[in-house]
Image (cartoon, rainbow, N blue to C red):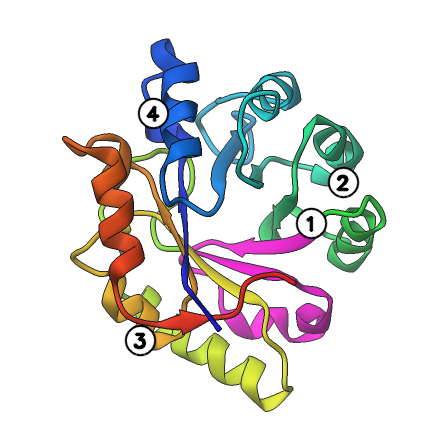
Amino acid sequence: MNKHLVAPSLLAADFSKLPEEISMINESEADWLHLDVMDGRFVPNITFGMFIIDAINSICTKPLDVHLMIEDPGRYVEDFRKAGADIITVHYEACPHLHRTLQQIKDTGAKAGVAINPHTSVQLLEDVLEDLDLVCLMSVNPGFGGQKFIYRTIPKVQQLKEMCAVRNLAPHIEIDGGVGLQNAEKLLQAGANVLVAGSSVFKAEEPPKAIRQLKDIGGEVMRFA
């Protein structure tokens, strides 16, 4: 058994110092690097695409956790995998043919994840739960960093954990948005095992220390084999 995972979100980094920021992640206790891809359509913001991820992959030594906040993500799955994505997460709300998209991801050799918005019920994942390596529960409205954590997320984590336990399933349960020391322990106690942390890491006076503090919070989970 291993401790929960911490995945700093690059969205909160200083992009004028990107190599230095990634070097810090490489040398830290972070487990993954979380990359938010936004298209200006599914969400109002625009971030970066596969070319930037390819450049990040050339210098990052951690697995790349790529979160596609985009419309029609199935069109781009192979491109993001080729760019270096180890985990590809698509939004339930953006995938009318979700099962097919998840199979596309698995066919590339990447781990397959689904993200759901704060208003979306975890019950809607019933029919694809067996196909998931990861479920990302959005604890803010997707599109911008630095938002306040939505505490309704905590009972959703518990509900999802119970759904998985009944079926003897153990996908990673990832929380994305407003995560920090003020709520991390409650999330882990509820059943989460991956903490995405943006501002609480990159805006900290000592980011490596902030990562270590998140790692030191109690709670043990299994990593990907």
Instruction: Work out how far the residue at label 4 is from the one at label 1, CA to CA, in angstroms.
Output: 29 Å
Which of pointers 3 and 2 lies earlier in the amino acid sequence?
Answer: 2
Instruction: Work out how far the residue at label 3 is from the one at label 2, CA to CA, in angstroms.
Output: 34 Å
Which of pointers 1 and 2 lies earlier in the amino acid sequence?
Answer: 2
Which of pointers 4 and 3 lies earlier in the amino acid sequence?
Answer: 4
Residue drawn 65% across and 63% down?
225
Residue drawn 41% across and 67% down?
192
Instruction: Work out how far the residue at label 4 is from the one at label 3, CA to CA, in angstroms.
Output: 28 Å
Q: Which residue is mark 3?
A: 189
Instruction: Work out how far the residue at label 1 is from the one at label 3, CA to CA, in angstroms.
Output: 30 Å
Q: Secondary structure at mark 1?
A: loop
Q: Secondary structure at mark 2?
A: helix
Please tell me whether residue 32 is drawn above or below residue 223 in the rendered image.
above
Q: Which residue is mark 1?
A: 95
Q: Which residues are magenta?
A: 111-137
Say what amino acid the circle numbered 2 marks.
Gly
Mark 1 crowd level (few <14, some 14–19, many ≥20, 10 Å Cα): some
**Answer yes or no: do the residues labelled 1 and 2 have beta carbons within 8 Å?**
yes
Residue 64's disc is none
Mark 4 crowd level (few <14, some 14–19, many ≥20, 10 Å Cα): some
Residue 213 showing in the rendered view: yes
Instruction: Work out how far the residue at label 2 is from the one at label 4, CA to CA, in angstroms.
Output: 27 Å
